[in-house]
Image (cartoon, grey):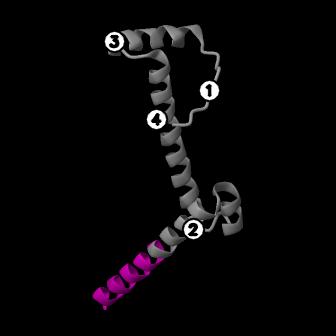
Amino acid sequence: MDALQLTVPIPAHVARDLDILVGLLRVDREKLLAEMLEREVTKEKERLLMELGTLYAQDKIAKADLVEIVGETIASEMELIKQKTRQSWTGAAHYVHRATD
């Protein structure tokens, strides 16, 4: 696995908390930090992509801007989701309209 080596200053109180975690879990400090960082980065990325996708679905962001921000692949996935959502809403509105007639 390719890995990026980082040197990041950590506040003393966080280092003490980290030492407690390492002792409780009996794991390697670097491995624990790498796993925690991976989890948090993934969670934040998913949150921001969801927020961006919502803005795009509401036509508050242009497709060209979306492509510039996330790349063609993710932008295409968001476009597909936007289309499917609109089709679903259109179908639901048609169904509700027929049911109320």
Point 38% across, 82% down: residue: 91
Q: Gap in Å between the C-alphas at discs 1 and 2?
A: 32 Å
Type of amino acid at the residue the image marks with label 4 = Arg
Point 51% across, 37% down: residue: 1
- Residue 78 to residue 46: above or below: below
Residue 5: percent from left, percent from top: 62, 26
Q: Which residue is mark 4?
A: 39
Q: Main secondary structure of the magenta part?
A: helix
Type of amino acid at the residue the image marks with label 2 = Ser
Q: Earlier in the sequence, mark 1 or mark 2?
A: 1
Depth check, front residue: 7 or 76: 7
Type of amino acid at the residue the image marks with label 1 = Gln
Depth check, front residue: 50 or 26: 26
Q: Earlier in the sequence, mark 4 or mark 1?
A: 1
Q: Which residue is mark 2?
A: 76
**Residue 86: image tag:** none
Query: Disc 1 on helix, strand or loop?
Result: loop
Depth check, front residue: 98 or 91: 91
